[in-house]
Image: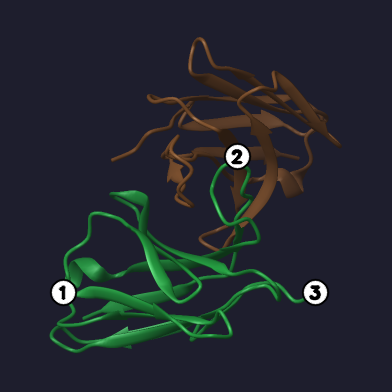
């Protein structure tokens, strides 16, 4: 079963604009991770945020985590055509198991 | 360091056959996890191995099995293939022993088509 639910399912924006994707989850977690996947290839790890962190930055990426609302957001600033991909949030099971529970993903398209 | 590698990259099988997929983790990583990705069900956890022991298992039938060798390389096996087993199978490795702070690094996947 899916723990994380991404919103929106699909997002299309112009190059240079910012893209925001949201993720909600159901149970308590130790950390939340965001991954990118290009055209059915492997997943590329973007960023990990721990449950005691509220915000994290990595280059053009900004991730927030609100454990009270069980939600996270991924912001990509100044988008580029190369950012076109599917983005997934993944949580652990809250019990320390090395097991990721993924959402269905957001399909992001950057138009030139 | 070399990333996670998976072989083969593509595979075509027929119903009833069995298949073995291989995964080599990043050097030094002892945890290897397997995931199945389909358009309908998305990414689903299959199982995780650490130090040659299966530590966690997802909700998949017994036809799906795996093992890990002393060098941390892992294989997964699917017996009596069904059409619904067609999927992208992803392997991930992690340095941490637990999922508490564990970033998992994924391989490129093996795309299995069952005819």
* Residue identified by numbered label 1: B82
Q: Residue at x 86, y 37 (%)?
A: A59
Q: Earlier in the sequence, mark 1 or mark 3?
A: 3
Quadrant of the frame with the C terminus of chain A: top right
Quick one: B14 or A52, which is closer to the camera? A52
- Return the x and y of residue B49 as percentages of the image width and height: 44, 68
In the image, residue B83 sits, relative to residue B36, either above or below, namely below
In the image, residue B72 sits, relative to residue A37, either above or below, namely below
* Label 2 CA crowd tier, 10 Å (few <14, some 14–19, many 20+): many
Rendered green, the chain in question is B
Secondary structure category for the residue under label 3:
loop
User: Which numbered circle lies on residue B1?
Assistant: 3
* Label 1 CA crowd tier, 10 Å (few <14, some 14–19, many 20+): some
- Residue A24 is left or right of residue A63, and the answer is left
Tell me which chain the residue with mark 3 is part of.
B
User: Which numbered circle lies on residue A33?
Assistant: 2
Q: Residue at x 70, y 45 (%)?
A: A46
């Amino acid at each position: 079963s899916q723990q994380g639910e991404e919103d929106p399912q699909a997002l299309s924006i112009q190059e240079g604009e910012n893209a925001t994707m949201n993720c909600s989850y159901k149970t308590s977690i130790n950390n939340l991770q965001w991954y990118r996947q290009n055209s059915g290839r492997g997943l590329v790890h973007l960023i990990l945020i721990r449950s005691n962190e509220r915000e994290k930055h990595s280059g053009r990426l900004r991730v927030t985590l609100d454990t009270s609302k069980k939600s996270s957001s991924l912001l990509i600033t100044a988008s580029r055509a190369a950012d076109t991909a599917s983005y997934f949030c993944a949580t652990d099971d809250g019990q320390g198991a090395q097991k990721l529970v993924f959402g269905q993903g957001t399909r992001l398209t950057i138009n030139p | 360091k070399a990333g996670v590698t998976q072989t083969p990259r593509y595979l075509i099988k027929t119903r009833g056959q069995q298949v073995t997929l291989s995964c080599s983790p990043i050097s030094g990583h002892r945890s290897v996890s397997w995931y199945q990705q389909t358009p309908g069900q998305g990414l689903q956890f299959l199982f995780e191995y650490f130090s040659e022991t299966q530590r966690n298992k997802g909700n998949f039938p017994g036809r799906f099995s795996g093992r890990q060798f002393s060098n941390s390389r892992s294989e997964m096996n699917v017996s009596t293939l069904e059409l619904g087993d067609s999927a992208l199978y992803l392997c991930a490795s992690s340095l941490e022993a637990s999922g508490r702070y564990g970033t998992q690094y994924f391989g490129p996947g093996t795309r299995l088509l069952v005819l």
